[in-house]
Image (cartoon, rainbow, N blue to C red):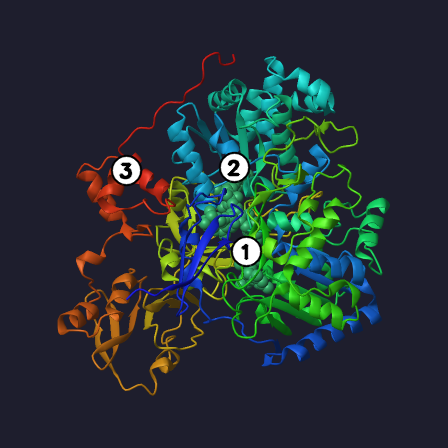
Amino acid sequence: MKNTTSSLKQTTCAYCGVGCGIDVSVSQNNEVTISGAADHPANFGKLCIKGSKLAETITNDGRLLTPMISNKAVSWPNAVKHVAGQLNKVIEQYGPDSVAFYVSGQLLTEDYYVANKLMKGYIGTANIDTNSRLCMSSAVSAYKRAFGEDLVPNSYQDLDNTDLIIMVGSNAAWTHPVLFQRMQRAKALNPQLNIIVIDPRSTPTSESADLTLNLKPGSDTALFNGLLAYLANHKLLDTDFIGNHCNNFNDTLAMAKKYTIEYVAQFCELKQTDILHFYKIFAATDKTVSFYSQGINQSSSGVDKCNAIINCHLASGKIGKLGCGPFSITGQPNAMGGREVGGLANQLAAHLDIENCEHQKIVQTFWQSPKIANKEGPKAVELFNKIKQGQIKAVWIMATNPVVSLPDSNQVIAALKACPLVIVSDCVDKNDTLSFADVKLPATGWLEKNGTVTNSERRISRQRGIMPPAGNAKHDWQIICDVAKAMGFNGGFNYSHPSEIFSEHAALSGYKNQGKRCFDISPLADLSIKEYDLLKPIQWPIKKTNGQTMGTDSLFTDKQFFTKNKKANFIAVEAKLSVAQTSDKYPILLNSGRIRDQWHSMTRTGTTSSLTEHINKPQLSLNPIQAEKLGIKTGDLVTTSSNTGNVILSALLTDHIRLGEAFAPIHWNKQYASNATISNLYSAITDPISGQPESKQTAIKIRKCEFKYHGQLQLSSDIKAQLTPVAEYWLKQRLNHSFNYDLADNKNGFITTHWYKPMMGKAGEWISLGQNNNAKQVMLYIINNKLKAVLMLSNQIIPDISPWIDHLFSQESINLKTIQQLLAAKPDNTFLKGKLICSCFKVYQNDITKAVQQGCNSIEKLGKKLKCGTHCGSCKSEINNLLNKTIITKPLVIKEGSAA
Ligand SMILES: Nc1nc2c(c(=O)[nH]1)N[C@H]1C(S)=C(S)[C@@H](COP(=O)(O)OP(=O)(O)OC[C@H]3O[C@@H](n4cnc5c(=O)[nH]c(N)nc54)[C@H](O)[C@@H]3O)O[C@H]1N2
Ligand SMILES: Nc1nc2c(c(=O)[nH]1)N[C@H]1C(S)=C(S)[C@@H](COP(=O)(O)OP(=O)(O)OC[C@H]3O[C@@H](n4cnc5c(=O)[nH]c(N)nc54)[C@H](O)[C@@H]3O)O[C@H]1N2
Ligand code: SF4
Ligand SMILES: [Mo]
């Protein structure tokens, strides 16, 4: 019988900066059902695979449910008293600069606002930085340089109304899937629309592109400087716009002049014809959006790269018009909200500047605060250096996992070990950063939290508290305010509802503004709790006209910018390659990034088998020619080392990677693997302006890693064992009915009684056949005819049959034939299906290839037959890839009257 729905509410996705609206219904027995919100303008009902599987990640298993001091549970009053007392003690003894907060684009705006207020207005220092430093800070600095304020000019509707999208350093097919699908729909409706992808790798995003430029890593500035020079040389500039609305054009062009096509071809390692093709299309297309992300931002010259792109939009007047503009896409769900409240160490609040006396006065007067920070604080990498050097003695980390995400994780660990007081607020009870926490504070998670987030197109949406907090978890804003009050700061933190914080944030944006700052949401300052609860998604800046509250979709339509003379700034930039360069010792350049179904350090997405199947291990993608020289085949374990550390990954040979390069995903960490934390390999090299780390390039060497003994242990998930593998190499994966551990070691007998522990005291038996003809030893553990564990040992890497074994764990009983198949490690043929492609409908590679052979020669036909790609669409580019092996892509279309 169906449960009657007790509530249906709209909230915003927990993951990426697209900011999709989600309708949530909770049945009377607390079953959560979700679907894309049809009326949310970010997604109009669509969700990607991560978003659509959110309900499966809602569980109290693995949640931090109570505050802990030195790993002992304590009450909230004791935890708050302890944290406040210790912070005050450190401040008293060493001054305000001895404490710091490291926060996150995954906090809500209300949480972020009070964290910033406490540090900058009450403790009185700017020692607060955020993981957005690793993500958006180069884009922020570039917008400020060009427009006078951190302003993303675009809206998603520009993607529906454009004729050219240039994807630079973005793998949106996997990282912003709902927007990518929107671009694909726009392309289907508008055959004029060209999509050009600029990325050293070929990616799922480039599968369906009209032109892909696999440039040399780090060389993007040269490509865009060359475009500026080309526009000037061919008299394709918008001279009116440049003359009337821009500063500093001549100096910028003078610097760009040397970037001839020949020079760019050599610098970027691209073909001259491809470059010319790109330049011609750009020049010929009025409506052009440049859509850029971490391939641009995460660089030691990331700010310059962003400005090189913006320069080309200014020079051609492709800005402030529908379907045009330099669109930096945000990563985290509330990266933009963090920018609004001033969560970075070099901002104040409400887009006000920290080292500007007038701005300091505005904020301090508004807050009525005892102090105001008046100089920039340390940026993320520097902040952790200061902790390591002992200048910062207490750090409070909220909603981020820096041991996994900051470069040079060994140094981050050293800093946390050296720090006398490490406080961590998180939703989960274990992650690599919590391992070093003196105090752990349980925070509410998605569906429990209540507040606002702002997406990539400046759209503020509500995340609504639909479920009660898990255990004793509290909202981040409450935890911060409780600590602030216990520190003695009574006046500024007496909020009883997040809407009060939002109102204050909105009022500050309008305070002494008079049109000087674009960020103004003051018409929302006096929303009642009810109005706040009902707030519909709205884009800032927000104005009140004739009693109507109105958002703004596109900026700069009046050609007015937020610099002193209201003109946009061209910025003269020189192309610089990454600081990290290969050498004889480290001959390969490693790139890092995301995979489709995992989110960052996997604290949520690693917990459901629906998301761990698509790519189930950390792989090092390598060019086959390179791999052959190193004697490496797909599936081999390889040790990958740089001058800062090493990891062990599974090799994947693919011609999508340039020679001399490699790619690894950022997600795996100590919770899931012995040694796969990619940030181990990256040095803490940063952009001199933004402080953003160069997280896309590091020099490595690779060698095949030969272990003498291999093992695979798969345990039924009802065996609640806390296994900490002891093998030299291990990898853990959550499947539907089991956990699977891949193991390898050089010591025989490395699988000691340790592995039998979960079974001890259980009334079952081990069945073993010794060595079978695959040189494997297989042992089964069976309780009352039900399979509970399978252990395989071999002197080679064991072929992965875990999906089949997982299926057997779900069976009521196991028969003799299956036992024999298991002991021979020979799965049913039906389980040899190749890679999972469509996670929504569980469609595997072999199903698709077979259907193509039977005549399904389009995504639509395949969708009809197998349903693949018909739900979230995140797998469409991979289906396309399988199809493309037989179908030739169509040539580029350049519109009539195109440039020379
Ligand atoms: N599935 C999934 N989606 C996510 C996230 C996630 O963890 N998982 N995280 C979210 C967050 S916080 C962010 S910031 C975004 C990031 O979104 P993206 O930036 O799209 O993702 P990345 O995979 O980090 O990197 C993008 C591309 O940059 C390319 N690149 C590397 N070096 C260069 C270069 O020198 N030049 C150019 N032009 N390209 C280069 C890489 O090859 C890669 O394909 O994703 C968001 N969405
Ligand atoms: N080499 C390399 N390094 C990178 C990148 C790269 O491309 N390459 N990308 C960088 C980028 S763009 C980013 S954004 C970072 C991401 O890196 P992180 O921010 O470190 O990664 P997450 O796993 O998202 O960590 C979020 C933590 O907050 C917890 N959490 C979630 N919601 C809440 C909440 O509401 N309250 C509290 N208190 N806790 C919460 C989660 O359980 C998790 O432990 O990684 C960066 N590092
Ligand atoms: S694109 Fe996917 S991850 Fe991003 S907000 Fe939408 S549903 Fe969530
Ligand atoms: Mo990010």
The residue at label 2 has a CB less than 8 Å from ligand 3: no
Cα gap from disc 1 to disc 3, whole angstroms: 35 Å
**Between 388 and 815, the one nearer to me in the picture:** 815
The residue to which callout 3 is attached is 860
The 10 Å Cα crowd at callout 3, few under 14, some 14 to 19, many 20 or more, is some
The 10 Å Cα crowd at callout 1, few under 14, some 14 to 19, many 20 or more, is many
Measured from the top left, where is residue 815 in percent x and y? Answer: 15, 73
Cα gap from disc 2 to disc 3, whole angstroms: 25 Å
Q: Horizontal placement of 294 versus 733: left or right?
A: right
> Are the residues flagged by discs 2 and 1 in contact, CB closer than 8 Å?
no
Tag 3 secondary structure: helix
- Please give the label number shown on residue 463: 1
Tag 2 secondary structure: loop
Quarter occupied by residue 715: bottom left
Q: Amino acid at mark 3?
A: Glu
The residue to which callout 2 is attached is 156
- Please give the label number shown on residue 337: none
Q: Amino acid at mark 1?
A: Gln
The residue at label 1 has a CB less than 8 Å from ligand 2: no
Q: Earlier in the sequence, mark 2 or mark 3?
A: 2
Front of the two marks 2 and 3:
2
Q: Horizontal placement of 793 versus 209: left or right?
A: left
Measured from the top left, where is residue 94 in percent x and y? Answer: 83, 68
> Are the residues flagged by discs 1 and 3 in contact, CB closer than 8 Å?
no
Looking at this rendering, what residue extends furthest in the left direction?
A: 817
Cα gap from disc 2 to disc 1, whole angstroms: 20 Å
**Could one spot residue 541 in this view of the protein?**
no
Tag 1 secondary structure: strand
